[in-house]
Amino acid sequence: MQNKSNDEILKMYMKLMDFFADFLGSDYEMVLHDVSDIENSIVYIKNNFSGRKTGGFITQLGLRFIKEKTYENEEYCVNYTSTLSDGRTIRSATYFIKDEYGELIGILCINVDVTKAMLFDEYLQDIIRGQKTIPPVEEVEVPFTKGLSQNLCDSIEDVAQYMMNESISKFVIPVERMSLDEKKEIICELDGKGFFLIKGSVKSVANRLLVSEATVYRCINSGN
């Protein structure tokens, strides 16, 4: 029996997405990524509420999954948060699509817009607690996966800027006053998150951190 090609496997998931999207409704967005081209990874999208399009890019968390090879030990990752550009909170999940050799070929993401549910929950709590004249009972937190979150940005440039800002913001001093060791720490952190899988990322980091591209490459190759 002849093995299916990667394209054939991904097309099978498109049919499955049609089924679940029609059944679950418009609050469930489904996005299929082909990881062979991370900057144009989106090959199919249903119930689009994030504003992304076919031919769009992978998220920063997707880059991290690829860099860390999370798919080697996990079949999927569920209940992490995503944030839309308008501030809405999204509950997300990722399923890793692999070939017969266990190599990652695609990522299926499901995003659930929980905004209405959160507002309804707040409304119910107001009814239950009245005017809240006494301290409320301890809040029940949504069991999101700790340490996993992402912003659903509008462009690959926005993804790159978000990742750089996130790493640089951990230091309380401006880039101009950072030591070389501090800048190397930022570079290594970005490398660990898969940042340098983005084309042109070395130049972007070099310009942002005020170092040479050779310094960035040396840090990436040495791992420190």
Image (cartoon, grey):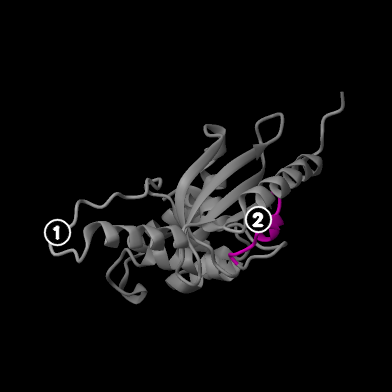
* Secondary element at tag 2: helix
- Between 19 and 99, which is closer to the camera in this rendering? 19
Residue at left 61%, top 59%? 26
- On screen, residue 139 versus residue 175, left or right, reads left
- Give the tally of numbered discs: 2
The residue under label 1 is: 135
User: Tag 1: residue type?
Assistant: Pro
Residue 149 in sight here: yes
Quarter containing the N terminus: top right
Confirm whether the magenta stretch covers residue 110.
no
Q: Is residue 43 above or below residue 171?
A: above
* Residue 219 in the image, given as x and y percentages of width and height: 46, 55
* Residue 187 in the image, given as x and y percentages of width and height: 44, 59
* Secondary element at tag 1: loop
Marks 2/1: CA distance?
48 Å
User: Bounds of the magenta span?
Assistant: 34-50
Disc assigned to residue 78: none
* Residue 96 in the image, given as x and y percentages of width and height: 61, 40
Confirm whether the magenta stretch covers residue 37.
yes
- Between 83 and 219, which is closer to the camera in this rendering? 83
Residue 212 in sight here: no
Corner quadrant of residue 48: bottom right
User: Tag 2: residue type?
Assistant: Ile
Q: Nearer the viewer, mark 2 or mark 1?
A: 1
Corner quadrant of residue 57: bottom right
Residue at left 30%, top 66%? 171
- On screen, residue 86 versus residue 174, left or right, reads right
Disc assigned to residue 38: 2
- On screen, residue 1 versus residue 206, left or right, reads right
